[in-house]
Amino acid sequence: GDGAKVQVFASADKFSDYAGLEKDEKAARFSALMSTLKRGDIVGVRGTPGKTKRGELSLFPTDMLLLTPCLHMLPKVPPGSSGLADKETRYRQRYLDLIMNPTTRSTFITRTRAINFLRRFLDMHGFLEVETPMMNAIPGGATARPFITKHNDLNLDMYMRIAPELYLKMLVVGGLDRVYEIGRLFRNEGMDLTHNPEFTTCEFYWAYADYEDLIKFTEELLSQMVLNICGGYKVKLHLEAKLGEPAKELEIDFTPPFRRIPMISGLEEKLGVKIPLPLESDETNAFLKGLCAEHGVECKPPLTTYRLLDKLVGEFLESQCLHPTFITDHPKIMSPLAKDHRSKPGLTERFELFANYHEMCNAYTELNDPVEQRARFAAQAKDKAAGDDEAMFVDDGFITALEYGLPPTAGWGMGIDRLCMLLTDNESIKEVLLFPAMRPVGMAADFNPDCQ
């Protein structure tokens, strides 16, 4: 059990049930027992520890019993392989993966250690863990396409939550100054190496703090977690060889402080341009379309300013973020729930943390002005009307809560799965999910039914 290997050295002479039997009878019974045991069976053994003549530590049984038979042949391990290698089998039949690959067990033990560290760290800093609804009448708290389900008793369409943010901020309005939730989110979007339709996140909200406090807190949290789990601040990633390219090894350094790149000025510096203001104008939208066309950056319709900026940042700024890097000061049009920057008009006090070129954290000083929040929601509704199904709905209930008074608050969210990919040296999110989403067997790769 628990992944340990034990060698059982069975001899008919040692079995207590065979004491007093003739040699031939003893051999016949022992042979009959051994013939019932097959590779993969779960066997109970009682005996004494010792060493063989070769010095191998073994268990010498006095009694053996078949507890549970394995009715399938376990896959054979190819020569030179350390375990089950076929990814399709490993993801669809995770129990086989766990049986045959010790590294898989180690991956999920590390995942649990990371979540436990995160929970302890927040508890030690005075945060209260809470639970919020997973089915919502309005999918709020993030810009993403939701899954739709049905509440039969109410005859009402419900949305699987895309973020717990609005509920958690309502709790801060109610006087719970430091709250967090670790749980599942659901987003009806693509599947690739870093995306799964359901995934685990941690979100916390901290009254009387701002995004500068969050930056320091994030640096301390992640650097201490990596040090605790990996034994140092540096994490090594081994990338699989691709066609025509050798395998690569990357080293990611979590030594604080982390680098910072302001979003708009960083983009202007990288591209050698000056983006026209205000960013909400039609002139800016046309300018960004031209930039995308000039640099071959593809953006699918609707070509809103938000989506164009997001694509350009992904191409030119995120590509610089091997080591942990904060991309800061996002525009208001990209941050409908973030507070205006105190010294930079048109921007917000927000950051995203990237590592290994992927987003790890999203955080900001929270917008707590109900009038401004309603205007931001209205702008999102305009984008939704233009065909952006990831834009936010107007949430009147949340605005009502803000009218009772949300103290100055900082909010933070991190994807647990991508963090675990780094900590366990894995390129695919499927490696850190026990049961990842998979296409049904036999479904074509380009199958795209018109349903949610």
Image (tube, rainbow, N blue to C red):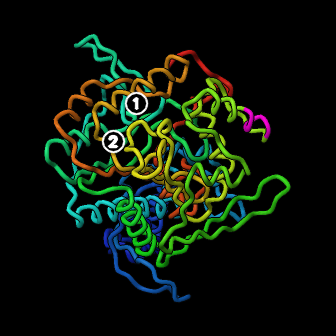
Q: Position of residue 311 (x, y in %)?
A: 64, 40
Element assignment for label 1: helix
Above or below, 201 relative to 396: below
Residue 300 within the segment the image draws in magenta: no
User: Secondary structure of the magenta portion, mostly?
Assistant: helix
35 left or right of 264 in image: left
Q: Which residue is mark 2?
A: 367
Above or below, 125 relative to 243: below
Find the magenta span and give its range: 290-294
395 left or right of 241 in image: left
68 left or right of 90 in image: left
Q: Is residue 73 visible?
A: no
Type of the residue with mark 1: Arg
The dot on residue 376 is: 1
- Quadrant of residue 398 within the rendered picture: top left
Labels 2 and 1: the sequence-earlier one: 2
Q: Position of residue 165 (x, y in %)?
A: 32, 40
Q: Position of residue 286 (x, y in %)?
A: 68, 29
110 or 14: nearer the eye? Answer: 110
